[in-house]
């Protein structure tokens, strides 16, 4: 049963409070055997408390699947990129290294790449994914676009990412400030910046207006 | 969304967008053969299935014909050399030893079944090549792998999975020496 099209996933890193609830809730999901698929990233741990949850963005051009030599990573008809198919996965780690967002995780004990599949057992029957159902600040939110627009008047959803020369459109949306002029997020823009004390916002959304500009 | 069944999903647009962003017509052929979309990946067209069946059964038929051909051109009745494989005193009654005949062959088994009676067979069971064990008091050769039984007098199958009798090495006792003179393959 496909994931309903009206319901979408929205990630808003600015709302993340770093509570790790999503990481814990992810373990409860039945589709990846008690292993958490969410990684809570610390953006600049020394200078800031800012964190952001990393879930699979479900690209329309999944780099993990493109690099898979065993043809093991498949996308279901509703655009959800699934964990590698066990009979095919050769645990080569290509997907882990290739993913622009750092999502796939290699389970060496099982010899299987497992990744966030948007809690396919839940979302395919219209339930929220585990992480979105527990997130207290709704940095991970799951609902309709109309709901989101009403709840977040100062943000807009962007689902286009630039990864080198590759443009990715994703099923999962990233919330960015409403008046940002760019329509995409450059995944690698800040790659070569030293992290300590940098204001990453300026690099990722190259023209965030100063206060009052909008 | 791609429906299962008709229409053939491999004829539809690729569900995923190739990383170079070029249209589907310019994409290499392997992209259609290894689609990322699950329904397209699982789809087997009638033509593909027919191709698979024809090719595999064709390969099977060719293999069988090859075996027939090989067995037709295989030299038969090639004279075997005579070779001393043991001396009479070497084995007690009921004793056994392995030897190779002709040299470099798989191991053969020589068994002394009576005072002047010797038999020799291939040591490899005709089922899956496990070594057989002589059980002289029971008058048979036993294969422990799958409980195959062979007659010690003739090499014929008595029980178990083997379908063919053990190839027999013909022996001749001259004086105190035992000569191997040939191999009888009874393909019965």
Image (cartoon, coloured by chain):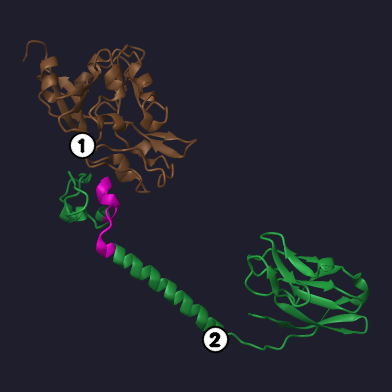
Chain colours: A brown, B green
**To which quarter of the image does residue A141 belong?**
top left
* Residue found at x 29% / y 12%: A17
Q: Is residue B45 left or right of residue B82?
A: left
Q: Is residue A199 above or below residue A9?
A: above
The quadrant in which the N terminus of chain B is found is top left
Mark 2 burial class by Cα count in 10 Å: few <14, some 14-19, many 20+? few
- The chain under label 2 reads B
**Which segment did they paint magenta?**
B33-48
User: Of residues B163 and B101, which is closer to you in this image?
Assistant: B163
* Residue found at x 36% / y 32%: A31
Whether residue B79 can be seen here: yes
Whether residue B123 can be seen here: no
Q: Is residue A137 left or right of residue B173?
A: left
User: In the rendered image, which residue does mark 1 sit on?
Assistant: A168
| Magenta-drawn stretch contains A79 | no
* Residue found at x 22% / y 49%: B4
For the residues labelled 1 and 2, say whether their Cβ atoms are less than 8 Å apart. Answer: no
Q: Position of residue A45 (x, y in %)?
A: 36, 15
Q: Nearer the viewer, mark 1 or mark 2?
A: 2
Q: Which mark is residue B72?
A: 2
Q: Is residue A80 above or below residue B179?
A: above
């Amino acid at each position: 049963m496909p994931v309903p099209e009206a319901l979408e996933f929205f990630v808003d890193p600015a709302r993340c409070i770093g509570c790790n609830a999503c990481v814990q809730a992810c373990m409860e999901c039945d589709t990846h055997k008690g292993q958490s698929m969410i990684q809570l990233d610390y953006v600049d741990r020394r200078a800031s408390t800012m964190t952001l949850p990393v879930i699979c963005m479900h690209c329309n051009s999944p780099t993990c699947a493109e690099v898979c030599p065993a043809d093991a990573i498949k996308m279901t008809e509703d655009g959800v990129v699934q964990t590698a198919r066990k009979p095919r996965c050769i645990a080569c780690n290509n997907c882990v290294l290739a993913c622009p967002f750092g999502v796939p995780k290699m389970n060496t004990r099982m010899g299987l790449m497992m990744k966030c599949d948007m809690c396919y057992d839940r979302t395919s029957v219209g339930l929220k994914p585990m992480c979105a159902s527990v997130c207290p600040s709704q940095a991970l939110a799951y609902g309709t676009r109309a709901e989101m627009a009403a709840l977040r008047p100062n943000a807009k959803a962007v689902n286009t990412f630039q990864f080198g020369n590759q443009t990715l459109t994703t099923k999962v949306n990233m919330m960015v400030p409403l008046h940002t002029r760019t329509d995409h997020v450059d995944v690698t823009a800040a790659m070569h910046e030293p992290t300590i004390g940098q204001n990453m916002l300026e690099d990722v959304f190259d023209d965030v207006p100063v206060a009052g500009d909008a | 969304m791609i429906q299962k069944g008709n229409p053939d999903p491999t004829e539809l647009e690729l569900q995923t967008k190739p990383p170079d962003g070029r249209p589907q017509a310019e994409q290499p052929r392997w992209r259609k053969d290894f689609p990322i979309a699950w329904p397209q990946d699982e789809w087997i067209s009638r033509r593909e299935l027919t191709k698979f069946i024809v090719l595999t059964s064709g390969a099977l038929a060719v293999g069988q014909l090859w075996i027939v051909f090989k067995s037709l051109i295989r030299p038969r009745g090639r004279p075997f050399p005579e070779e001393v494989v043991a001396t009479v005193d070497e084995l007690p009654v009921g004793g056994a030893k392995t030897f190779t005949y002709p040299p470099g062959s798989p191991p053969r088994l020589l068994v002394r079944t009576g005072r002047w009676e010797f038999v020799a067979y291939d040591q490899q069971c005709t089922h899956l090549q496990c070594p057989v064990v002589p059980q002289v008091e029971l008058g048979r050769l036993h294969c422990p792998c799958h409980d195959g039984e062979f007659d010690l007098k003739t090499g014929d199958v008595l029980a178990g999975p083997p379908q063919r009798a053990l190839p027999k090495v013909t022996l001749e006792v001259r004086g105190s020496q035992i000569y191997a003179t040939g191999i009888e393959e009874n393909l019965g």
